[in-house]
Image: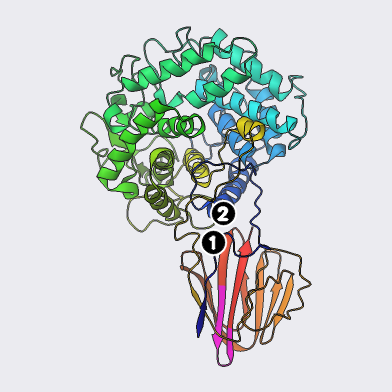
Amino acid sequence: MNFLRFLPVCLSAAVTFSYAVLDLPSAQPKVDASYWNAALDSTWQGMIRRNINPYSAGAGLIHRPKSETPGDAVSEGVGYGMLVALYANDQASFNKMWEKANETMWNGDFHDWHMDPSGNIPMDGHGAATDAEEDIALALIFADKLVSAGKWTAYTSPKLQKTYAEQAQKLLDKMWDTKQIRSEGIVAPGAGWGGYEFVNPGYFSPAWYKVFEKFDKSDANRWKTAVDKSYEIISKSPGYSMGMVPDWMTPEGGWVGSEGLGYNAYFESRAFFKDAIRILWRVAIDAIWFDESRAKEFLKNALKFINDKGGPSAANFYQIEKAGELLPAEDKWKEFNDSKNESTWRYRREHSHLTIGMWATAAMAVGEAADRIAFSEEMAKFYEGGDYFGLANDTSAALEDTLHNEMYFDQFLAWFGTSLMSGLFVNVVDAIDNPKTATPGDSSSLTKIPEVPVDSDTVVVDTSNHQDSGKGNDKPGDDKIIASPYVASGAVQLVQTGEGFFFTATRSAKWTVYGLDGRVVATATGKNFAWSAKNMHGIFVVKAVSRGIRYTHKIVTH
């Protein structure tokens, strides 16, 4: 018996890994890019299925299925959704989302932050959320660049009668006009709300401001003040030495309590919780895109802290005053996900795809290959191959599963963290204006296919490339690409179905499907084996063993 080793990317010149996500080569650090790009493609489709398609009010917007008012939509989701749609290379969803936000949320100065489930803006839903405005502006600037490069089609909003670029410029001007950004460069959490008295550091996006500076035709220099002021405030954070900021703080680094600051002001705003953790992602992008030294120093503190705690397995939310202790074990979050149903409440401590994805961004920006690989493998524990991040069932009693997850905020933060791991989240303007040669990045066990024993009479086939006639005429032991819907190989035949594959053997066999990490994902016994690959994306190895049959089949599903 000999062993055939499948290489992770360069298996053969004939093999390509093509996903729907945006394809802009980059030299950014990356890990397990092919694996995670397939997951990003799939999980975006899951968001469409769960968070967009079921809703008629505000059709096209990202909805929150488990919020305090289930089925509502917020401007944050517009910004997140447009960014993900852009990197998923889905212009149709991008346009639909932007247009519905123009119709329902845009008030001429900014997007009102909250739309109720019926599609109306409630009394307390008026006002801006600055992070949403800056995310939408960046998405529009990048969309404009894709149009100019011929990768997307030119589009003008029927509601606003503005192109991507025209509305982006208006958003930039309005952020200053409505005091979402104060004249000193302080990024306030809303229009004329906060800034001097309190800030939400998780909103600070210095990489965005550097892109805005190059785009802004009104006053490019103003964005330099926003960059510098953001880093000045971050440096005053009481958690700076640990690479953390509180959810809310004063610009001078003081505590602000929780009154009037929403449910993410948990723990009197003295925790590194759901609002605050986004600072890792937003600052890591500045380190990766612009080699920002201030970002790197902060992230080095973060990476040292989490590695001292145990590395990726310690990714979680933390207290700041108590020198990085975990949040109290007994604390549960009851405000969302059916607040009247105790069985859906979740712990505020959270080792999950959300926290792993955010802490991973520090590793991508300032870590070594070992750090990047460790975070990729930890994230894989919370991706089961379907169209969502997270666990269908959690057997650890941590309540970390899809029943207890929001299936909104957690999905986006996992997506953003993972897209930095794969190298997908690039500076679109720079990638087009200054094309790079793609670097291969690191590979963990996720993209190093396990050795599979292959007998001398084994035929190895691959359904990812449709160039061969598919007559099944490979010689025993060949590693040739046979890429057709129908493959015959002696004792085993394969038919590709709408949702998977149907194998037939001349006699009863034991069938096993392996994932990239060697994990068994399906088994069966008999002459026929129907494997449903629905919502499964990546590379799989199918083995059939019986008297006289030794068959191994590699499948790449997109």
The range drawn in magenta is 542-550
Q: Position of residue 232 (x, y in %)?
A: 37, 17
**Residue 477 visible in the snapshot:** yes
Name the one closer to the observer, 281 or 223. Answer: 223
Q: Secondary structure at mark 2?
A: helix
Residue 170 among those drawn in magenta: no
Does 349 appear above or below 180?
A: below
- For label 2, the crowd category at 10 Å Cα-Cα, with few meaning under 14, some 14 to 19 and many 20 or more, is many
Specify the farthest residue to the bottom: 547
Q: Which residue is mark 2?
A: 34
Q: Quadrant of the C terminus?
A: bottom right
Quarter of image, res 174: top right
* Colouring scheme, one of rainbow, by chain, secondary structure, one colour: rainbow
* Left or right position of 132 against 242: right
* Left or right position of 269 against 558: left
Residue 543 among those drawn in magenta: yes
The residue drawn where x is 66% and y is 74% is 502
Q: Earlier in the sequence, mark 1 or mark 2?
A: 1
Q: Position of residue 489 (x, y in %)?
A: 69, 82
Q: Do the residues under discs 1 and 2 have CB atoms within 8 angstroms?
A: yes
Q: Which residue is mark 1?
A: 8
The residue drawn where x is 60% and y is 49% is 41
Circle number at residue 174 = none
Three-letter residue code for mark 1: Pro
The residue drawn where x is 66% and y is 34% is 432
Q: Position of residue 231 (x, y in %)?
A: 39, 20
Q: Main secondary structure of the magenta part?
A: strand
**Residue 189 visible in the snapshot:** no
